[in-house]
Image: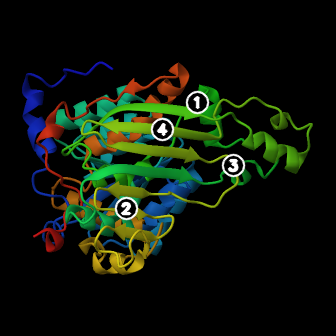
Amino acid sequence: MKRRDFLKTGPAALSVAPLLAGAAPADEPDEGRPGGKARIAVIGVGSRGTGLLRSLCRLPNAEVVAVCDLYRDRAEAAAKICADAGAPAPKVYAEDERAWREVYAREKPDAVIIATYWDSHAEMSAAALEAGIHVGCEVPIAMTVDDCWRLVETAERTGVPCMMLENWSFRRDNLALLNMIRLGMLGEMMHGHCAYSHYGVPGSYKADGRGDTWRNRYIAERGLNCNYYPTHALGPIVSWFDINAGDRFTEIYSAATAARGVNDFVRREFGPDHPNATRAFSQGDVVTSILKTANGKTIVVNLDTKLPRPYANRWLAAGTRGVYDEEKASIYLDGVSPAAEAWEPWAPYEEKYNHRFWSQGSTGGHMGTDPLMLRLFVDSVAARRPTPLDVHDSVVMSAVVDLSGRSIKENRPVEFPDFTRGAWKTRQPYFALDRRREG
């Protein structure tokens, strides 16, 4: 994997240090500029974008100045949501695939929320950074390693913050565990497991068996066989294992099962003569990736969306002094847990080590993570501080899409790029610092 030398010399290098150093933590309890608001544009107001918009409308320091979508009815409905919430109706941009560029040029927002199709995320984010607009982009923020580098280089050159909206990084349980890890309660972290396990076949194929959704079309048209949705799994792992801040991923090996789940579902629901009952799908039912780190740690990541099962992320974090298992809702701490080699319930620990982000609770989308994440993002924009998650952590999660596909295709481990260009060796953790716990 070739590294880019884009920022070794010249004016671009001036912006690299502040971004990598994480100066002025984004999540300090700072409500922004006195009396000021962050002017926000929302690009893409389908189901996900509309949900984020509703949360934005509840924030006192957020002003939605524009909404943009390919479909005018969606955009106008989104503008009405703002008006119904008692805020000024934002300007509507619609029907033109390039309308989002007009939003950047005409409205000059402080920040943009991008909730469009996957393959547009990197282009829209990079253009926003060039325009001096803070970026909050849905997952994954990029689908290729080249686009990951493009975002890193652009953010470092411009000095404009760029954040992927990985809401599971902000879950109450995940942040409580992060506090415990930073207190040394699990010892040195050694191994982790995570997954995106979500039976998506009935929702995609139940109407007529064709599965003609934008996500299925994207996968089919590109012949994907990879972990195309890794960030919900990896979000907490990146902070638990100090990735990009003391350690980094060095290589990834991925393997995929055959594709049988969709065929079986369609055969049962629509009969053996339906075209999708025998169609050869490129995307395997389950993808398993093993990530190695520079400091000798291992992470297993699963994508499991084609076989029947309840939703699960299956987080596990094992250290030299204990292990946490999210699926069991249990923890074991050597020398602390009352019974040797016996699990303890997780709930009391989550309460005791509750992160300050959750000190006042949060309700709304995705277990309250969406409103919390957006509040922290908007506070950072209004205060002109770094975003809660930075561009380097955003791309390190997203790069798994491309790298897992390469590994499956070539049946070998592939090198994982160092998006910090060596800065991980001295860079300090910055995400979700809780000085109440850490002293």
Tell me if mark 3 has few (under 14), some (14-19) or many (20+) residues whose alpha carbon lies within 10 angstroms of its own: some
Residue 148 versus residue 397 in the image, above or below = above
Q: Amino acid at mark 2?
A: Val
Label 1 Cα crowd, 10 Å radius (few <14 / some 14-19 / many 20+): some
Quarter-of-image position of residue 131: top left
Q: Nearer the viewer, residue 414 or 106?
A: 414
Residue type, numbered disc 4: Ser
Q: Which quadrant of the rendered structure holds the N terminus?
A: top left
Task: Report the Cα–Cα distance between label 1 and label 3.
Answer: 18 Å
Residue of label 1: 224
Residue 154 lies, in percent from the top left, at 24, 33
Cα separation, mark 2 vs mark 4, equals 21 Å
Q: Which mark is residue 323?
A: 2
- Label 2: how many Cα within 10 Å (few below 14, some 14–19, many 20+): many
Q: Secondary structure at mark 2?
A: strand
**Within the image, what quadrant is residue 262 found in?**
top right
Give the mark nearest the N terminus, 4 or 1: 1
64 sits left or right of 244 in the view:
right
Of labels 2 and 4, earlier in sequence is 4
